[in-house]
Image: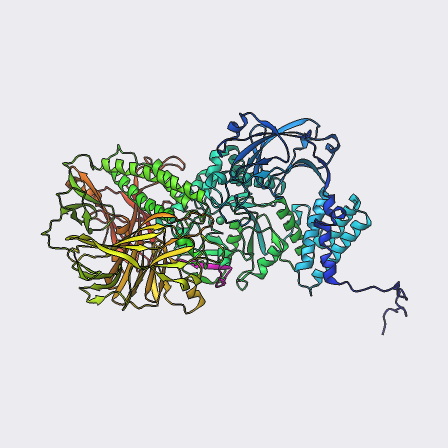
């Protein structure tokens, strides 16, 4: 055996004798000690915090202040504001009131002793928002106030001892508006803000960097598991940094020494983007983002400024941090920037070209998706994508709604039709009953279309880029079996702001830890959200099977938003139907006469306004009162414009109401035949009602005389009990409620035994916190019936009968409901119509109306965009129970085999079906954030539509009809125009709905030039299957000469050609269940 010889004794310097006792560190004491180094408090003067600044220019001679205070809460432009006289002012003065603007001119001279310092900043704080402008009117930096984002880096050239001028535009509101204390309380009008800081500061950059090092390593000590060596190491590093600082008495050298110690844990590259320069795979993609609520606790006018403040800062950060990427949604905000801050818009445009500023979302605003109509959801995408394409040469591929209150079942289909295959949100993490089980999954629409959905596991879109956010990006990831990557969306938000330099610095250190020590998931900056999704899509291609979620992403919170701010919701429904009519009539007018100009400009104005009001705090009713003053005003403009446009189109089509000898006709803009009893203009001797009957377009109007066969009648069968009847129904009204609704041909009682339909009920409505947003499950326990005070006959017939009931709600509130039955004509559908006038002066109450029906089913049906959603009528599981209040559109329906009942409405969205009890939500009375929400007079229309047979096209059509009443007009020669007005229709498939008829957006005679015009003229027809079955029919266009037809996407891109039928002008179409299809007819 060979080998080396070993020494007999190990050579060691390990001392033979112990030098003295050494104790085990008490971990929690050494952890708690860390706060001393960076926090304020009794040791501040001896801490790192006291070393952050090397000097200050405080004296008024270095920072001279002058102010101009514009009158009447106006928000003048830079040019207007700076043309006024400014008066001297000083730190310590207060400025207000709430929502006022003050312009400051600042004459700044860097004191001699600071001229040689490395890094100078101007610090400004008045606890409110502001924007710094250069002397020549460039907006350069947003200020948040209250210690947040209060610093602006001074240009290097200003270290010359000379005086330099710039401006601060102060807004008298904080990031979250003007509430005091509780953020969602209505803001007071008289809030004042004291300017407490306006100074030049020299920053010790080493000290600043060490404080971030220390923060993140301290987090590692606190947040890594206590039994991990990584936690213990972090604690040792932090204590060593503090000890070095103490030993060096806080000298510059000791701070540099501290930074060196920090490198043991962070690695050597955290001071630059170099930290990301390696190929180690990263699980977490960090993306900067700034959620700016388009209105919420502040009005639109302030949002315009928030956009400039927030995005100016982001452009600046992009210049300083090469790895930084920032995404932002909402075309409307970009449009405002372009309009009010053109130079900043150009700067953003440059960054978009570089790929650092990333437009995302593809929609006009981050809208609500529960309540807007199907066509509204489409237009969000059309107007959004067209804006992004026109201004940045690109469309978005990710739909971005981090904060919206639940997601419609049809969104995946509509996204795909608008060029987007990806969807991002996180809001379902707010569910307060069930935890949503997936992070990354395929989300599937009613028609089977899917998008790749990711819900950030950090459960926020306003992450502060904390160590914990990075950690939770994996620990809270619920799809790790398929893929462990995730997005970390960081930056201050809701009130704007976006990422700060601290966020980016912190993430550098988190990455440093991941590469040096491990345990923390690796974060990466520099990619886009699209890069992130592209990798997921690649994984699908390579065979990864992500789980699926079919149907709506129901949000288990904020259920009150289907009802709050009733007037705003009513305006939305009205605008949607008006726009439908306008596009249809204007299309017909433009086809009839080449001299008629399709009113694209007015239509764009109306759509953009309506889309703006879909914002996820506007339509849901969760904004402050000012916002609803704004939306009322905008809707008024929309309706006034709409009336003008309709009038012009009708004129072009030969209608003229001013010529009495013209024939009276009813105009039916719906694409199917209608038969209705209509009220004629009041004239004492003439008949009061007429029968309008006929196909789409122009309906003949026959005045009804008493002798007409079909009638309705009413009698008082016993004291206070009235019987209303027509050929279909016999209705008993006792004490103002319907105790019996008998379907004569079906021989069936509709009301459940002992039930009272049209019973008004009131609930106590005090949710856990979010008043305007939430109605909580326990409100159901407080149900109280409102007894009628008085019932009388209001109309005797013979063509329409009514009883009116007065109900006292409280000393200040009352309701007057009119139950009516019209003559039923032939075999036509009939409904019990109800009109409610309500004077509503309640506090924290919820008014609903009930319909207990004799129908049994474990599921009810609710109209949603382009389809039907079925939801449980029971509370079997917590998922079923969570849907105790849900969203419907024009109707909700409870049917069993062979029979059912639909409840239709003209402006309501909240509904509940519990067992056989159907309940339409009418009015709420939250006091925050709008103290006066829904106070005042309301007019509501709804109806009960019993139907023999299943839920079918009769309900779909009745929903449209209730919302789009026939209109009486006069026409000189109705026969001549009849074919024009009934050309566009669908034959052979009652389930198919021709929902929209419009002109091509880029037709040469329509285009407004934002995108290249196309030669020739086209008509776009949108059709959908409304019942959820494969439908085959023929789309007809009457006498219009069509050369070619393409099935296209909603953006009207070139599509697949569809063969035109030889006879009669039309194309055969076949749609999947709940498919939405767009046909472009090229003329
Ligand atoms: Zn929001």
- Expressed as whole percent of the image width and height from the top left, the position of residue 573 reads 34, 48
Quarter holding the N terminus is bottom right
Residue 879 image-quadrant placement: bottom left
Q: Which residues are magenta?
A: 431-447
Image: 990 above or below 151 = below
User: Is residue 362 toward the left or the right of residue 123 in the image?
Assistant: left
Whether residue 357 is in magenta: the answer is: no
Whether residue 442 is in magenta: the answer is: yes
User: Is residue 207 toward the left or the right of residue 613 in the image?
Assistant: right
Quarter holding the C terminus is top left
Residue 455 visible in the snapshot: yes
Image: 1012 above or below 688 = above
Of helix, strand and loop, which mostly describes the magenta segment? loop
Residue shown at the point (49%, 43%) measured from the top left: 298
Question: Observer-nearest residue: 688 or 263?
Answer: 688
Question: Observer-nearest residue: 250 or 1018?
Answer: 250
- Expressed as whole percent of the image width and height from the top left, the position of residue 305 reads 51, 38
- Expressed as whole percent of the image width and height from the top left, the position of residue 485 reads 56, 57
């Amino acid at each position: 055996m060979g080998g080396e010889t070993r020494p007999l004794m190990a050579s060691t310097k390990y001392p033979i004798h112990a030098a003295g006792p050494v104790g085990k560190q008490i971990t929690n004491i050494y952890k708690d000690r860390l706060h001393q180094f960076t926090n304020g408090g009794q040791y501040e003067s001896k801490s790192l915090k006291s070393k952050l600044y090397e000097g200050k220019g405080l004296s008024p001679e270095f920072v001279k202040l002058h102010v101009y205070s514009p009158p009447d809460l106006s928000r003048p432009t830079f040019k207007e504001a700076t043309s006024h006289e400014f008066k001297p002012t000083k730190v310590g003065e207060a400025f207000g009131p709430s929502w006022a603007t003050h312009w400051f001119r600042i004459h700044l001279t860097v004191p001699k002793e600071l001229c040689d310092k490395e890094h100078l900043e101007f610090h400004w704080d008045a606890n409110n928002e502001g924007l710094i402008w250069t002397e020549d009117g460039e907006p350069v930096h947003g200020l948040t106030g209250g210690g947040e984002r209060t610093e602006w880096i001074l240009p290097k050239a200003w270290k010359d001892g000379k005086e330099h001028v710039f401006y601060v535009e102060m807004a008298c509101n904080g990031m979250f508006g003007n509430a005091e204390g509780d953020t969602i309380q209505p803001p007071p009008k008289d809030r004042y803000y004291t300017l407490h800081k306006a100074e030049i500061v020299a920053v010790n950059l080493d000290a600043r960097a060490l404080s971030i090092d220390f923060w993140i390593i301290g987090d590692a000590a606190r947040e890594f598991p206590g039994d991990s060596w990584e936690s213990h190491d972090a604690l040792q590093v932090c204590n060593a940094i503090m000890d070095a600082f103490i030993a060096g008495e806080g000298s510059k050298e000791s701070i540099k020494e501290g930074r060196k110690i920090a490198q043991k844990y962070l690695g050597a590259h955290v001071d630059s983007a170099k930290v990301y320069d390696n190929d180690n795979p990263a699980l977490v993609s960090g993306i900067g983002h700034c959620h700016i609520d388009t209105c919420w606790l502040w009005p639109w006018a302030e949002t315009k400024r928030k956009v400039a403040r927030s995005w100016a800062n982001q452009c600046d950060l992009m210049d300083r941090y090469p790895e930084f990427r920032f995404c932002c949604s909402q075309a409307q905000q970009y449009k405002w920037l372009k309009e009010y801050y053109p130079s900043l818009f150009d700067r953003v445009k440059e960054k978009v070209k570089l790929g650092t500023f990333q437009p995302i979302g593809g929609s006009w605003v981050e809208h609500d998706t529960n309540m807007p109509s199907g066509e509204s959801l489409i237009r969000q995408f059309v107007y959004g994508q067209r804006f992004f394409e026109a201004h940045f040469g690109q469309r978005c591929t990710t739909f971005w709604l981090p904060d919206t209150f639940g997601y419609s079942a049809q969104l995946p289909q509509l996204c795909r039709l608008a060029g987007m295959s990806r969807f991002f949100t996180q809001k379902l993490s707010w569910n307060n009953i069930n935890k949503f089980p997936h992070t990354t999954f395929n989300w599937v629409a009613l028609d089977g279309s899917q998008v790749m959905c990711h819900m950030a596991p950090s459960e926020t879109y306003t992450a502060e880029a904390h160590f914990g956010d990075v950690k939770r990006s994996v620990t809270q990831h619920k799809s790790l079996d398929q893929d462990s990557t995730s997005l970390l969306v960081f930056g201050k938000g809701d009130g704007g702001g976006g990422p700060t330099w601290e966020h980016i610095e912190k993430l550098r250190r988190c990455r440093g830890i991941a590469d040096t020590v491990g345990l923390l998931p690796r974060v990466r900056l520099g990619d886009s959200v699209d890069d992130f999704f592209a990798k997921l899509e690649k994984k699908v291609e390579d065979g990864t099977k992500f789980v699926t979620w079919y149907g709506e992403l129901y949000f288990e919170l904020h259920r009150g938003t289907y009802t709050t701010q009733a007037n705003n919701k009513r305006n939305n429904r009205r605008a949607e139907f008006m726009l439908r009519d306008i596009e249809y009539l204007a299309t017909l007018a433009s086809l009839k006469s080449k001299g008629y100009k399709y009113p694209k400009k007015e239509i764009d104005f109306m759509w953009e306004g309506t889309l703006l009001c879909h914002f996820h705090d506007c339509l849901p009713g969760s904004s402050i009162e000012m916002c609803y003053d704004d939306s009322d005003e905008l809707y008024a403009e929309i309706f006034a414009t709409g009336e003008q446009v309709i009038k012009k189109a009708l004129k072009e089509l030969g209608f003229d109401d001013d010529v009495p000898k013209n024939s009276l006709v009813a105009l039916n803009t719906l694409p199917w035949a209608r038969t209705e009893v209509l009220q004629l203009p009041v004239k004492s001797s003439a008949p009061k009602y007429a029968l309008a009957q006929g196909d789409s377009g122009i309906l003949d109007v026959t005045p009804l005389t008493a002798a007409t066969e079909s009638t309705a009648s009413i009698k008082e069968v016993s004291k206070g009990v009235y019987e209303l009847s027509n050929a279909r129904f016999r209705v008993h009204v006792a004490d103002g409620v319907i105790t019996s609704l008998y379907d004569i041909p079906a021989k069936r009682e509709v009301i459940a035994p002992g039930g009272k339909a049209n019973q008004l009920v009131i609930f106590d409505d005090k949710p856990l916190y979010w008043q305007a947003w939430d109605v909580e499950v326990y409100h159901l326990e407080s149900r109280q019936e409102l007894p009628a005070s008085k019932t009388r006959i209001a109309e005797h017939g013979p063509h329409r009968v009514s009883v009116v009931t007065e109900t006292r709600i409280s000393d200040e509130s009352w309701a007057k409901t009119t139950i009516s039955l019209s003559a039923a004509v032939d075999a036509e559908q009939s409904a019990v119509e109800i009109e409610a006038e309500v004077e509503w002066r309640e506090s924290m109450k919820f008014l609903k109306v009930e319909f207990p029906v004799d129908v049994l089913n474990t599921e009810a049906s609710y109209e949603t965009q382009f389809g039907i959603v079925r939801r449980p009528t029971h509370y079997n599981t917590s998922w079923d129970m969570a849907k105790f209040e849900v969203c419907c559109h024009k109707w909700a329906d409870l049917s069993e085999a062979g029979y059912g009942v639909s409840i239709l409405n003209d402006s309501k969205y909240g509904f509940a079906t519990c067992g056989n009890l159907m309940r339409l939500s009418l009015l709420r009375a939250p006091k925050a954030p709008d103290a006066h929400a829904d106070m005042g007079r309301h007019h509501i229309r709804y109806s009960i539509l019993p139907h023999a047979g299943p839920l079918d096209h009769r309900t779909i059509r009745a929903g449209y009809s209730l919302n789009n009443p026939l209109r009486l007009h006069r026409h000189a020669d109705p026969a001549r125009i009849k074919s024009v007005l009934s050309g566009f229709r669908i034959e052979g498939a009652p389930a198919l709905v021709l929902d929209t008829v419009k002109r091509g957006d880029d037709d040469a005679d329509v285009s407004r030039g934002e995108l290249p015009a196309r030669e020739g003229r086209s008509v776009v027809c949108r059709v959908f299957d409304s019942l959820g079955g494969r439908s085959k029919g023929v789309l007809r266009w009457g006498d219009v000469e069509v050369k070619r037809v393409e099935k296209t996407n909603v953006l009207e891109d070139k599509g697949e050609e569809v063969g035109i039928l030889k006879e009669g002008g039309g194309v055969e179409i076949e749609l999947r269940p709940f498919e939405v299809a767009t046909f472009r007819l090229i003329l």
